[in-house]
Amino acid sequence: METLYPLTAAQNMHYQWIRRYHTQQVSGVSIVAAVKLDLDFKLLNKCINEETKRYGCLNLRFTAPDKDGEIKQYLKRKTQRNIKILNMSDMSFEEANEIMQTMAYETFDGDDIPMYQFLMVRLPNGFNGFFAHMDHRLIDSCGIAVMVKDIMALYAHYKYYKAYPEALADFEKVLIQDLEKATNEKRFERDRQYWENLLEKYGEPLYSDIQGPSVLEASRKLHHDQSLRSADIETNNLFVEVKDYILEKEPATRLLDYCRERKISFNNLMLLAMRTYLSKVNGGQEDITIESFIARRSTHDEWTSGGSRTIMFPCRTVISADTSFFDGAMEVQNTQNSNYLHSSYDPQLIRKSLKEKFGTPDGTTYESCYLTYQPLQVDSDNLDLSGIPLYFKWFANGAATKKVYLTITHTPEGGLNFSYHYQTAALTEKDIELFYYYMMRIVFMGIEDDSVPIGAIIARV
Amino acid sequence: MKNEKKFKEFLAQYCDVKPQDMTDEMRFCEDLGLSSFDFMSLLGDLEDTFDVELTPDNIGNVYTIGQALALINDERQSA
């Protein structure tokens, strides 16, 4: 009998979305990783099977819900298997991506079943590799980057006699540590007090939407409450579109250099740009909350154990128009640093507390925008395959639980990719274009002279 | 210094510097390569490992290994 463990807070976040939206699709994550090389597929099959032994998180399964709807997790290793090859070499990349995108929409339905699937793929232009479709409760994007690197390293070892990759951390051991940490009473109480004090200090948050105050107004009408401060979440039409914008190397370098010189993290600079835009389109609103994702990976073991560690916390800042851009950035940074110190807490408890204190209606939220910055790249230079062209692509699961979800990654050319996932029920590409355009205007004006007040930047852009 | 060995072994989990190569002057971010999240996460774990209580006031001026060690020793003495 396998040992049963409760879900961690990060896993539970995904599970609660599955429960709320009645589909596992919201928890899907898919990638393709391929190299321009005539791969030995039999060997690649062996490496992927070996990875399922090395990377314990892939063996997670979930029990059927109990009478309260809660589930548990356990590890069960799958026996060796033959992985199918999907040949798309005679197609265009557009056609091949379309097929893989369709596969990314598929769901893992059922209890006590494996929650991942690998396919080996032949892609156009001589690229060969694998497609992986998984449940986010097994793995997050950092975990995927580590897995891809490890599979490639195994292949390089067997094929080219490169060094055997170092052992990855024991997933189960790290899981147990995480669960113990979460139940450490002293730490829990410190964290609880911190998040409660924030609510005491600032009171009820105020919703801000990239489409302006009309969204909150509509919710106020719907709930017959003119003082309502939260807005409704779209629950019926979850379909999501993805719009990517590339910031080229030179301007991207300017932003990163500014961060280095002023000792501001890039994530925090982007939070400031987002919140300033939200302030601009909401009549200068000073109290803005954005959901910021935290990877919760710091130690060597946390980096290489896989698992789903990414979790979101509200980054709430109250910044007046006369605050300088730099002071605004520091305000965001101080808030984030304090949040980091208390990020072992389960953010579900923050929402529960909000509901108890302020009577937040079911199905409403205080945040419209979510941010993830992924400094970890998947490129050929860090895959033991230096010089060999790599094709790596994320596929959206097609069902967003969030109105706008921005993921920022580095491009292999030294630029930055701003990937906006947005619910089409309310937003169009035009809304996203404006969002990106103004974010860039705000942030470049800010770094040009960071003594300029935020209000002046809003007026000028 | 009291707690030094234990602290350096603890710190080695977060960076690529071996405990024996760590010096008091080394800065967490610039020399050990810790991100702000790493640093705050380290402080959270440090509270549990060394049974000390950190506040924004007493961690505000901690940038180096030596300063962190001094803080741990002070906090443990006053506990």
Image (cartoon, helix red, strand yellow):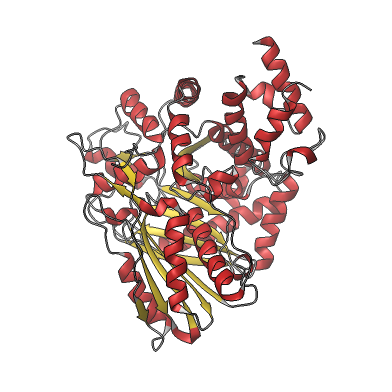
**Residue A157 found in image quarter:** bottom right
**Residue A161 found in image quarter:** bottom right
| Residue lying at 63% horizontally and 70% vertically, measured from the top left | A413
Left-right relation of A160 to A73: right
Task: Name the spot of residue A442 as percent of width and height, x first.
Answer: 59, 53
Q: Nearer the viewer, residue A95 or A203?
A: A95
Location of the C terminus of chain A by quadrant is bottom right
Q: Nearer the viewer, residue A435 or A103?
A: A103
Q: In the image, is residue A337 above or below residue A213?
A: above
- Outermost residue on the left side: it is A67
Task: Name the spot of residue B17 as percent of width and height, x first.
Answer: 73, 44
Can the viewer see residue A328? no
Q: In the image, is residue B53 above or below residue A307?
A: above
Location of the N terminus of chain A by quadrant is top left
| Residue lying at 31% horizontally and 58% vertically, measured from the top left | A399
Q: How many marks?
A: 0
**Residue A115 found in image quarter:** bottom left
- Outermost residue on the bottom side: it is A90
Task: Name the spot of residue A431 as percent of width and height, x first.
Answer: 41, 60
Left-right relation of A70 to A369: left
Q: In the image, is residue B38 above or below residue A51?
A: above
Task: Name the spot of residue A149 as percent of width and height, x first.
Answer: 55, 63
